[in-house]
Amino acid sequence: MGEARYTTLIRQGYLEFPSRLRRGRVYRLDSSGNLSCRDPGQSTSSTTLCIQSTEPVPRADVLALRYLMVTADEPGLLATANPVRFSLRAITIAIYRDARERYGGLGAFLYTLGVLGLFLAALAVEGASAVGLLSACPVVGLILCVLAAPVAVLGFVLVLAGLADLWMLVVGGICRLWGSDAAPLPEGVGPLEDG
């Protein structure tokens, strides 16, 4: 990476690199080691490339590894990294795949169901305590709101992700009815294949 680039990374907070495989694509590596990409026409990086190590790695080594993957082995990067996008399906699949390595198929299914259920239940508890308990018993309602708020936020995110998936399903159905081959992608979302 070199001292000058590393200093720029720390001072600026990120480095950007043009893709060698795809004209107009720009990779951004931030000082925390997060790697994302921006395709032509996008003003911000909408896709994060997730590369998870199996052992603890010092942050400087993570930065160097990801820097080398972008600059020296972009095909290897694209084969290794998992693009992370915001959708309920993507979140569910990520939780399941992670749990499958630890607990096997049935255990992963139950774990995924439990995690998603916990988030959605916390959202329901938050809503019920905000509506009912705050007016009837303000102290208990406030305590439940504070305790369930962090998990309820994740439940709210899952609901939003589910609505985004539902929207894409509806738009895809309309496109198929009108004879189009594929649903249009939202602005800023595109395939990561080489092109």
Image (tube, helix red, strand yellow):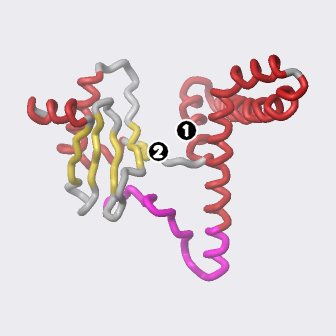
Of the pair 133 and 74, the residue shown nearer to us: 133
Q: Main secondary structure of the magenta part?
A: loop
Of the pair 179 and 7, the residue shown nearer to us: 7
Q: Amino acid at mark 2?
A: Val
Residue at mark 1: 94
Mark nearer the viewer, 2 or 1 = 2
Quadrant in the picture for residue 100: top right
The residue depicted at 86 percent of the width and 26 percent of the height is 133
The residue depicted at 60 percent of the width and 35 percent of the height is 96
The residue depicted at 28 percent of the width and 31 percent of the height is 31
Q: Which mark is residue 65?
A: none
Q: Is residue 80 left or right of residue 23?
A: right
Q: Is residue 73 left or right of residue 36?
A: left
Of the pair 2 and 130, the residue shown nearer to us: 130
Image quarter (top left, top right, bottom left or bottom right) of the C terminus: bottom left
Q: What segment is highlighted magenta in the picture?
A: 171-195
* Mark 2 Cα shell of 10 Å, populated few (<14), some (14-19), many (≥20): some
Check if residue 63 falls in the magenta segment: no
Q: Amino acid at mark 1?
A: Ala
Check if residue 180 falls in the magenta segment: yes
Counting residues from the N terminus, which is met first, the one under dot 2 or under dot 1? 2
Where residue 80 sits in the image (x, y, percent)? 36, 41
Residue at mark 2: 84
Q: Is residue 40 above or below residue 123?
A: below
